[in-house]
Image (cartoon, helix red, strand yellow):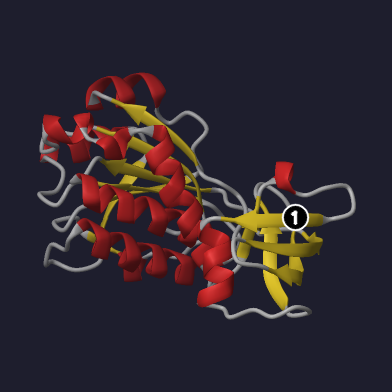
Amino acid sequence: MNFLLLRPDEIDGAGFATLRGRRAEHVRTVLRATVGQGLKAGVLGGLLGTASVKSVTGDAVAVAASLHDEPAPTPDVLLLAVPRPKVLLRMLAHAAALGFGRIVLFRSWRVEKSHLQSTAMRPEVQREQLLLGLEQAGRTRLPAVQFFPLFKPMVEDHLPGDLPDACFVAHPAAPTRTHELTLAPGSAFALALGPDGGFLPYEVARLAERGFLPISCGRHPQRTETALAVLWGQLALLRARGSLRP
């Protein structure tokens, strides 16, 4: 936790909030905060700023929040074939930290049915991981999460929907490499990632029909977590450099 993520309902009209549980323990034992110390803070779904520590007791930490800065927009979309439960939870935290504003989960052919029955698919469990990702990165906008149990209806009935203009599907055999792309500064993108076994050629083709350009960051397949970090980093770098030209 690199900053305090406060809930709107725990801040009173004067900007004071009392923390208990995990966050208070972190402030006391990890940050070792003392009275008067300023901490980076934000309110969930809202502004960023600082929180001044007013008191530290055995089970609570009281802070006064001063929040004035607008958070960065989160227009990017992640389409993720449901991975193994532990991997899913880590990837949700990663996606929130990286700034994806929407996460679309779905079952592709190589996704085990048992993954869909795990506790990792519960909204409250996913929310906890998303919050941890926001705390890690100093963000306040909670990603929206959708789930589609079947690939074909998702593609045929719900895409492209309100996706960004630049849409990509990761595929090691794709002829287009990421270094051949450029993205307009500030533009949003959607990225579709398959499970560790990858998408079937049929699935890549269906996504391509809906405007997803197959791309590769190298001919060697990567684990889904690695692919997310590498591809997001490359696309974000391209976005900072130029205009879109697939």
Q: Which residue reaches farthest front? A: 58
Left or right of 64: which side holds 128?
A: left
Residue at left offset 75%, top offset 66%: 49
Considering depth in this image, is 190 or 49 the residue closer to the camera? 49
Q: Bin the neighbour count of mark 1 within 10 Å (Cα to Cα): few under 14, some 14-19, many 20 and up.
A: many
| Secondary structure type for disc 1 | strand
Is 18 situated above or below 190?
below
Q: Is residue 45 above or below residue 173?
A: above
Residue 214 location (% of width, % of height): 26, 50
Q: Quadrant of residue 182?
A: bottom left
Q: Is residue 148 visible?
A: yes
| Viewer-closest of 159 and 81 | 81
Q: Residue at x 75, y 68 (%)?
A: 51
Residue 31: % across, % down = 56, 78
Task: Name the spot of residue 91 as percent of width and height, x first.
Answer: 33, 54
x%, y% of residue 109?
Answer: 12, 33
Screen quadrant of the C terminus: bottom left
Q: Is residue 158 left or right of residue 143?
A: left
Give the vertical position of 186 relative to 153 (above or below): below
31 relative to 4, above or below:
below
User: Count the marks: how many?
Assistant: 1
Question: Of 168 and 227, which appears nearest the observer?
Answer: 227
Task: Give residue 184's quadrant in the image.
Answer: bottom right
- Is 60 in front, or is 69? 60
Regarding residue 184, the answer to whether it shows in the image is no
Q: Which residue is mark 1?
A: 17
Q: Which residue is drawn at the image coordinates 46% and 58% (left, top)? A: 133
Please tell me which residue is depicted at 20% across the width and 29% down the height of the picture: 117
Q: Amino acid at mark 1?
A: Ala
